[in-house]
Amino acid sequence: MNLNGNTILITGGSSGIGFEMAKEFLAANNKVIITGRNRERLEKAKQKLGDVTIIQSDVSKPDSIKELYAQVSKDFPDLNVLINNAGVMFTINLQDHNLSASELTKELDINVKGTIWMNDTFLPLLKRNKNAATVTVSSGLAFVPLPISPVYCATKAALHSYTLSLRAQLKNTDVKVFELAPPATETELLADFNEEDMKGIATMKVQAMVADFLKGFSKDKYEICPGQASQLKFMSRFFPSFILKQMSKTVDRMHGS
């Protein structure tokens, strides 16, 4: 993939990984569109990023995606890269039954359904353009769960499986299908976790993680696992019981509290 001369849409681009991607792609002379649910946060991101297009949109709502597509296909018919980055992560005690049905599955609506709906909507446009790609941002936790975030990890495992199938189904097209599986990355996504939750987990600076992504993206490495994510994948394959036991230690703290 070329790292310049693209028109790129990044969901969840007002902060964290999406914001850092937008910054780097803008610096490399690409046209960049970022979306998010919060207009104020998008405006603040634009102040920092400069020449970026912001569009308020919610990937968990099909009608919002349809409106986004109508605007993007009209204003940016040369769109050739879609980065499905929008996501949320919560700690959930599965023995505490106080969450509503919608709260319990919110991560599914945004992380999984949002990615599937975005691809389904935008692939016809991507297939019309050269040097096209779609990127799924999954997680190292797609390979082994962190049990205090059970729904989040399930969504990322689902995205990993879905992306493998999507790549197989698009093999007769010119659209390349990438998966970025970040390790624990220093973004606000980890705000729901305390020091005990993160004990033994090496976090990666977002700048370094995105740099690894861009390196893999430029070399058509379709599955990119920066930092500790590659170790999680290895351990889940060869030592699954051991790594799950290690990742489960925080459950005792959760239930104890």
Image (cartoon, rainbow, N blue to C red):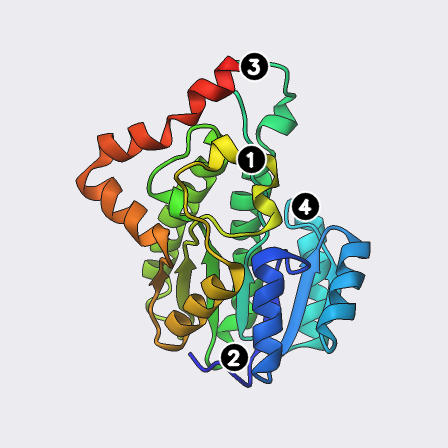
Circle on res. 193: 1
Disc 4 to disc 3, C-alpha distance: 28 Å
Disc 2 to disc 1, C-alpha distance: 41 Å
**Which residue is at 54% across, 26% downward?**
92
- The residue tagged with tag 4: helix, strand or loop? loop
Discs 4/3, front: 3
Proximity of marks 2 and 4: CB atoms separated by less than 8 Å: no
In the image shown, does 124 or 201 lie closer to the viewer?
201
Discs 2/1, front: 1
Residue matched to label 2 = 129
Give the residue type that dot 1 points to. Phe
Discs 1/4, front: 1
Disc 1 to disc 4, C-alpha distance: 27 Å
Give the residue type that dot 2 points to. Asn
Disc 1 to disc 3, C-alpha distance: 17 Å
Residue matched to label 3 = 96
Q: Quadrant of the C terminus?
A: top right
- The residue tagged with tag 2: helix, strand or loop? loop
In the image shown, does 66 or 4 lie closer to the viewer?
4
Q: Is residue 27 left or right of residue 127?
A: right
Residue matched to label 4 = 61
Q: Is residue 94 visible?
A: no
Give the residue type that dot 4 points to. Lys
Give the residue type that dot 3 points to. Asp
Q: Is residue 254 left or right of residue 32?
A: left
Disc 2 to disc 4, C-alpha distance: 26 Å
Among numbered discs 2 and 1, the one appearing first in the sequence: 2
- The residue tagged with tag 3: helix, strand or loop? loop
Disc 2 to disc 3, C-alpha distance: 49 Å
Discs 1/3, front: 1
